[in-house]
Image (cartoon, grey):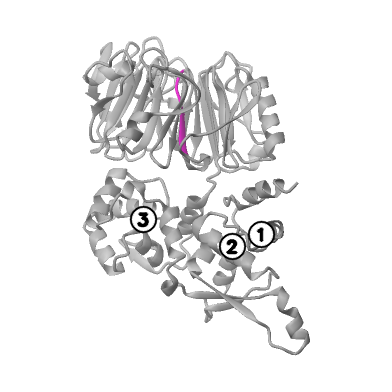
């Protein structure tokens, strides 16, 4: 994990814990890292969840596999953990007025929030804001518990920290670790401010704000907001704005800003993400240049200056300089920079869509692959799918295709709207991994055959017999998405007549290749008792390199874990 940078409070402690984690797991690619004051770091890697403080502790989820963790949010003293199943876990102390489960408000292990599970409420997004926790359901209902609940004019919370339904038709909510205010975005893209406003940090006037519209932030397609104790920094269609206390933004700070104002020294730069702690900020430009500014009393910005009042660039060193996209996560007085690696199944499909290779389906000029669109869109006739999507316009169709390929650039309300017309039930529970796995059983639509010679049949050849070939049917597009070897082969032959059969020369047994092909469909390793597991694992390890599996694939780490059981 040499490619993780930590700055600020307890920096040496975390560096030591990260090194210990590396020694234990032999991993170099964390998927999620987040920090919470008093609770340390939470790290997911190799499908395991670890807490890093003075030592390394592995944590477990009661009802979900760690691989299902979708998001981890950090508040002032607790973590919220959201899984793809819709279950939410809480870990740490929720603070005064925060969530309580069976009269408890402090959790030393991840604890599922029973209310959502017991009432069959599927949660799609979460957020923390100081001592307030927010939850958005797949039906776009906003649940809240904590100090900010009253700003929504909702019924007061009872002493046991009961969840309150505070608003409907909510698309997103933006908060911050130490933020005493928040912003809610409704389905129509209107944004409202709620909470304390003593520094005009809501971008409007008035000491306390109860659901008041913020014009600058409304009707924005690409929006992100970081709330701190006295400030709000917003990313509006690539431009960075500030509201509230502004001494760290290169602005006139003789008075608090009366509204949102562009930060002058970076107003011509387009950014793709912003990040913040209690009073320090980071922003990543579209060209991956990193900027930083704000309070730096614990060196949380990686320099010796006590404050950085004007945004300045941050130079990376070591392996991170070659990491491409980066992720930054912040605690109140901590910053952590690490590679943004979209590990897993979805990223391989989204990358393949971006390459626009061998597309055979199109609507509004949006190109895709018929079999993928079909299996994700209710197995309807491709022309019927086109006809339905044309009723929604180009922007919503683009969102649907992004969802089809496992992306994240879509509004879930749009997905529900289109799914209803396509007659897709429970779309909130449909995952790319599940739908693609169903293709494995669809033998009629498989359009390619891999011929494999079993090494055990060599004796027949010596006696003059013909080679016995095993046929493994597969979808050509699955090979293109998940194997660099087949992708290169199909692209090389794209201008020539391509046969639908190829002989495999990897010298792997048919059983091992069938396991690998099944993994391509399901993202799950299915070892059977009929094979020698140790020998099969060794063959599959070779296959990872031979078939050029993408680095996003988790197969290599899974095989390593299985091997360790035989040592």
Contact? badges 2 and 3 (CB < 8 Å): no
> Left or right: 28 with respect to 366?
right
In this rendering, the answer to whether 405 lies above or below 310 is below
Mark toward the start of the polypeptide (2 vs 1): 2
Disc 1 marks which residue?
540
User: Label 2 belongs to which residue?
Assistant: 515
What's the CA distance linking mark 2 and mark 1?
Answer: 9 Å
Residue situated in front as seen by the camera: 499 or 185: 499
Q: Say if residue 308 shows up in the picture.
A: no
Q: CA distance from mark 3 to mark 1?
A: 33 Å
Percent x, y of residue 115: 33, 29
Please tell me how crowded label 1 is: few (under 14), some (14-19), or many (20+) other residues with Cα within 10 Å: many
Q: Is residue 22 magenta?
A: no
Q: Quadrant of the N terminus?
A: top right
User: In this rendering, does residue 506 appear at all?
Assistant: yes
Label 2 residue SS: helix
Q: Nearer the viewer, mark 2 or mark 3?
A: 2
**Which residue is disc 3 drawn over?**
401
**Point 23% across, 22% down: residue:** 211
Question: Which x, y percent locates residue 50?
Answer: 59, 31
**Drawn side of residue 412 relative to residue 36, left or right:** left
Q: Residue furthest front?
A: 529
Residue visible at 54% across and 75% down? 449
Predominant SS of the magenta segment = strand
Give residue 440's position: percent from left, percent from top: 47, 65
Q: Is residue 489 above or below residue 225?
A: below
Circles 2 and 1, Cβ within 8 Å, touching? The answer is yes
Q: Earlier in the sequence, mark 2 or mark 3?
A: 3
Give the residue furthest to the bottom.
464
Measure how far apart labels 2 and 3 are at the Cα level.
Answer: 29 Å
**Magenta residues, start to end:** 70-76
Residue 71 covered by magenta stretch: yes
């Amino acid at each position: 994990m040499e490619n993780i940078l930590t700055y600020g409070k307890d920096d040496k402690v975390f560096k030591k814990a990260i090194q210990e984690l590396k020694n234990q797991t032999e991993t170099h690619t964390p998927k999620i890292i987040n920090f919470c004051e008093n609770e340390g770091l939470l790290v997911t890697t190799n499908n395991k969840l670890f807490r890093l403080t003075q030592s390394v502790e592995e944590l477990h989820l009661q009802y979900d596999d760690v691989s299902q963790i979708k998001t981890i949010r950090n508040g002032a003293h607790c973590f919220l953990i959201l899984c793809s199943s819709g279950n939410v876990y809480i870990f740490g102390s929720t603070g005064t007025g925060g969530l309580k489960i069976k009269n408890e408000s402090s959790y030393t292990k991840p604890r599922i929030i029973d209310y959502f599970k017991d009432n069959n409420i599927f949660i799609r997004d979460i957020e923390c804001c100081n001592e307030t926790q927010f939850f958005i359901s797949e039906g776009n209902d906003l649940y809240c518990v904590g100090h900010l609940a009253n700003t929504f004019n909702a019924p007061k919370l009872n002493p046991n920290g009961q969840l309150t339904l505070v608003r409907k038709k909510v698309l997103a909510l933006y908060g911050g670790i130490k933020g005493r205010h928040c912003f809610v975005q409704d389905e129509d893209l209107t944004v409202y401010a709620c909470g304390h406003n003593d520094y005009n940090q809501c971008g409007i006037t008035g000491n306390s704000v109860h659901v008041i519209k913020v014009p600058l932030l409304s009707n924005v397609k690409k929006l992100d907001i970081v709330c701190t104790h006295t400030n709000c920094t917003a990313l509006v269609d690539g431009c960075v704005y500030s509201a509230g206390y502004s001494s760290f933004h290169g602005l006139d700070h003789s008075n608090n800003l009366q509204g949102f104002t562009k930060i002058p020294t970076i107003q011509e730069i387009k950014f793709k993400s912003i990040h913040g702690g209690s009073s320090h900020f980071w922003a990543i430009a579209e060209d991956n240049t990193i900027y930083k500014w704000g309070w730096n009393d614990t060196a949380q910005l990686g320099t010796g200056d006590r404050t950085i009042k004007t945004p300045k660039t941050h130079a990376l060193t070591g392996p991170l300089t070659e990491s491409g996209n980066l992720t930054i996560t912040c605690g109140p007085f901590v910053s952590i920079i690490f590679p943004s690696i979209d590990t897993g199944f979805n990223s391989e499909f989204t990358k393949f869509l971006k390459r626009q290779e061998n597309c055979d389906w199109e609507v509004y000029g949006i190109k895709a692959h018929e079999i993928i669109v079909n299996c994700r869109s209710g197995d309807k006739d491709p022309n019927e799918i086109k006809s339905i999507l044309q009723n929604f316009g180009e922007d919503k169709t683009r969102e649907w295709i992004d969802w089809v390929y496992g992306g994240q650039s879509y509004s879930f309300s749009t997905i529900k709207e289109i799914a209803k017309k396509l007659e897709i039930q429970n779309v909130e529970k449909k995952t790319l991994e599940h739908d693609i796995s169903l293709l494995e059983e669809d033998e009629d639509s498989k359009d390619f055959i891999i011929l494999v010679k079993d090494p055990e049949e060599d004796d027949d050849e010596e006696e003059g017999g013909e080679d016995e070939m095993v046929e493994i049917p597969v979808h050509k597009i699955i090979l293109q998405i998940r194997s660099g070897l087949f992708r290169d082969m199909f692209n090389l032959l794209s201008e020539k007549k391509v046969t639908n059969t190829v002989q495999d020369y990897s010298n792997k047994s048919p059983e091992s290749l069938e396991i690998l092909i099944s993994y391509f469909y399901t993202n799950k390793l299915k070892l059977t008792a009929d094979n020698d597991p140790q020998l099969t694992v060794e063959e599959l390890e070779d296959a990872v390199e031979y078939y050029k599996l993408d680095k996003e694939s988790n197969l290599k780490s899974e095989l390593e874990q299985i091997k360790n059981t035989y040592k």
